[in-house]
Amino acid sequence: MKSSMDLLVLLLLIPHLLAFAFSANEEAFIGVNIGTDVSDMPSPAQVVALLKAQQIRHVRLFDADQAMLLALAHTEIRVTVSVPNDQLLGIGQSNSTAANWVSRNILSHVPATNITAIAIGSEVLTTLPNAAPLLVSAMKFIHSALVAANLDTKIKVSTPHSSFIILDSFPPSQAFFNRSLDPVMVPLLKFLQDTGSYFMLNVYPYYDYMKSNGVIALDYALFRPLPPNKEAVDSNTLLHYTNVFDAVVDAAYFSMSYLNFTNIPVVVTESGWPSKGDSSEPDASLDNANTYNSNLIRHVLNNTGTPKHPGIAVSTYIYELYNEDLRPGSISEKNWGLFDSNGVPVYIMHLTGSGTVLANDTTNQTYCVAKENADKKMVQAALDWACGPGKVDCTPLLQENPCYDPNTVFAHASYAFDAYYHKMGMADGTCNFNGVAKVTTTDPSHGSCIYPGSRGRNGTFTNSSSVAPSSDSTSGCHSRYSHDIHTFLSSLIVGLLTFSTAASL
C-alpha cells in the first residue's frame, strides 16, 4: 500500500518537475522588448525587417498590437504579447472578457504568428497594488480561454515582476518576497507551477547600483571580471557571485523556496543599461551600456546559469529595441534602446563567439551613404574630397570598373563615403561630410560592386587608425570622378571644404 501511495505522489509531482527539468535541458535565448513611445516609430514591417537583419528570434510586446502581430506572421519569431495594466481590471473580473481578449488577440493570429507567452500586466504588485487581488484571477481566466482553444501547452501565462518585490536580496540565500504580498504570491506561484509556466522577473543592475550609494561596485554591476577577493560570497551557501544579475536571479529562486516552490524557472523579461543620462547619472553612458549588454548576452548564451542553478537557462529579454524619446522622466528613461528609430545601432556591441543574434556585434554592419535629398554640388564636393585629400581608393568608380554604374554623383559618393567611414574605423563623426552623408544598416552593395563595409564583414577590410586628413593632402585623380566640368572656383571651394569637413569629421 505504501509503495502504491509513493507512486501516486511521484506521478502527481511529475508535471511540477517537468518545467524545471525542461529549463535545464533547453538552450537559453536572448530576446528584445519592443516599446513604441517613439516620435518617429518605424512601421511594423520595418520593425520586422530589423529583427530579421539582427537575427532576433524572441520578442516581447507591451500590448497585442494587431498590425505588429500581422507583420510577425510567418517569421517564426517567438512572440510574448501582453495584457496592458489598464486592461487588467476588466479581465480579472470577467471570464468572458478574458475569453474575448484571447479570441481577438490570440486566436485570430495563431498559428501564423508564433505567440508563445502572454504577460499579464507589468510589475502590477509594485505599480498597481490596488489591482493585485485580481492578478491571479486574470491569469487563470486567460489560461482557461487557452485551454478551451487547446493552446495551453503552447502558450504560457505569467506576469512580470519588479525585482524590488524581493527584500534583503543579498545574500541571496536570505532573500524573501515582501511578506505583505503573500496572499497574492502564494496562489500566483501555485498557478505557475500547476501550468508549467515560469516566473517573469525584471532585473536592472543599473538601478541596484544607483540605489546602493557606492556599496555595489560598477564593475560588479557590469559583469566585468573581478579578482577573487572582490567577489561577493553568500556566507550561508558559500556561493560566489561575480555580478549583480546572477545575485538577483538567485534571490528570486531563494524567495520562491522560502514559500516552498522550488521548481519554477526564471525568465528575465527586462534587463539593460541606459546609454545616456543627465548630470546626476554619469554612469548612464554609451560605454557602460555597451559593456553591460554585450556581457549580458554573452553570459546568457553561454548557458552558465547562476551559482544556485548552474547550467539552468536564464533566458533574457533586453530592454529595449529602440530608444523611446517620448517616454516621460529623466534623460536616461529615453535612452535604453539598442537602435535609434532609423535602425542605426546606438553603439556597436562586441559579441564574438556568442552566436549570431544581434548582428551589430561585428562592428561592420553599418554603412555610410549620401543623403538622397542632399544638395548635388555639396555631394560632388564631398566626393572630390574623399577621393582626394581623404585618400580613399576610388579606383572601383572608374569606367569599366565594378562600381562605375550607376554613373551618378550620389552612387559614387556613397561608395567613397563608405570607404572613408570604414577606413576611419567607423568612429563618431566620420560619416558627416558637411551634412550630406548618413549612416545606414542597409548594405548598399549591388551586383559586383561590393562596398567596403561588406568586405569588412568577411574580415578582408581592416580599420585604419589614421586621423582625418589635413588640407595639405593631395591627389591628382579626383577629377576622374567628376560629373561636372570643374573650374578654378569649384577647386577653391573643395579646398575650403577640406578644412570644414576635416573639422566635422
Image (cartoon, helix red, strand yellow):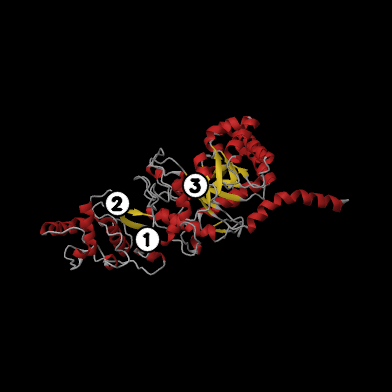
> Residue lying furthest front in this view?
400
Q: Given the image, on which type of amino acid does mark 2 rest?
A: Lys
Residue 335 numbered mark, or none: none
> Residue lying furthest right in this view?
1
Q: Position of residue 36 (x, y in %)?
A: 45, 41
User: Looking at the image, is mark 2 or mark 1 earlier in the sequence?
Assistant: 2
State if disc 3 and disc 1 touch (CB < 8 Å): no
Residue positioned 52% across, 48% down in the render: 59
- Name the front one of labels 1 and 3: 1
Q: Given the image, on which type of amino acid does mark 1 rest?
A: His
Dividing the picture into quadrants, the one containing residue 452 is: bottom left
Please name the residue that numbered disc 1 is placed on: 446
Residue positioned 37% across, 43% down in the render: 331
Please name the residue that numbered disc 3 is placed on: 33
- Name the front one of labels 2 and 3: 2
User: Looking at the image, is mark 1 or mark 3 earlier in the sequence?
Assistant: 3
